[in-house]
Image (cartoon, helix red, strand yellow):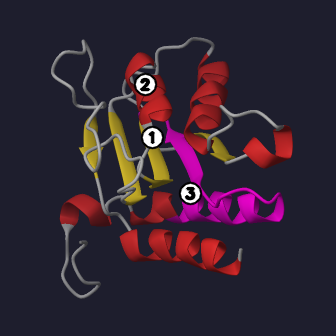
Amino acid sequence: MSSSAQEPDPVRDRWREPMELALAQARLAVGGGDVPVGALVLAPDGSPLSRAHNEREATGDPTAHAEVLAVRRAAEQLGGWRLADCTLVVTLEPCTMCAGAIVLSRLDRVVYGARDEKAGAAGSLWDVIRDRRLNHRPEVIAGVREEECARLLTDFFRDR
């Protein structure tokens, strides 16, 4: 569980503002009937390179997860697939597909909000991102604005 709002957490507090941008993306997904997950890739200087939200329902593409779309768009912006020194910020813990894309794109860091006990691959169900057998292991920072991210998902599924 995340620490309360009153307790300062310098590791997570640094990512609160970028997570708000990811939350804004997640809210856009609902309009298209998609699960509200939002993501962005930050450049080494912290500026946003790309933003995305789930588009599986909107596009009929099973790989159109927010993380994959944000990674693709960031690579396009940089003109190459290596996203070294970049950070992915996402509202929900990445699944195995997204974890693979994160490792293969060489992102330095993944910051996520809500845990995904059913499909999470960054520490909950699996830990693909930090698997020692792989040649690249990004840093993982979990639980940033966790309650807000989880509430968005809970509300979405309750309304279904």
Q: Are marks 2 and 1 in contact (CB under 8 Å)?
A: no
First along the sequence among labels 3 and 1: 3
Rendered location of residue 160, percent (x, y): 71, 74
Query: In this figure, which residue is indicated by the disc labeled 3?
Result: 22
Q: Nearer the viewer, residue 90 or 82?
A: 90
Say which of 25 and 45 sits in front: 25
| Residue 93: image location, x then y, percent | 41, 50
Q: Which residue is mark 1?
A: 95
* 104 left or right of 156 in image: left
Q: How many marks?
A: 3
Residue at the bottom extreme of this rendering: 6
Q: Is residue 45 visible?
A: no
What's drawn in magenta, residue-wise? 20-44
C-alpha separation, residue under disc 2 versus residue under disc 3: 20 Å
Q: Is residue 72 magenta?
A: no
Where does label 2 land, which residue?
100
The amino acid type of the residue labelled 1 equals Cys
User: Are there few (<14), some (14-19), or many (20+) residues within 10 Å of tag 1?
Assistant: many
Please tell me whether mark 3 sits on a helix, a strand or a loop.
Answer: helix
Is the N terminus in the top left, top right, bottom left or bottom right quadrant? bottom left
Given residues 95 and 66, the one toward you in this image is 95
Res 61 visible: yes
Q: Nearer the viewer, residue 15 or 97?
A: 97
User: What residue is rendered at 57% in x and 30% in y?
Assistant: 71
- Whole-number angstrom distance, CA of label 2 to CA of label 1: 9 Å
Determine whether 76 is above or below 155 in the image.
above
Q: Please state which amino acid type lies under the numbered disc 2.
A: Gly
Question: Amino acid type of disc 3?
Answer: Ala
Cβ–Cβ under 8 Å for marks 2 and 3: no
Is residue 141 rendered to the left or right of residue 16?
left
Question: Residue at coordinates 47% horizontally, 15% vertically from top-left?
Answer: 82
Look at the numbered disc 2 and give the secondary structure of its residue: helix
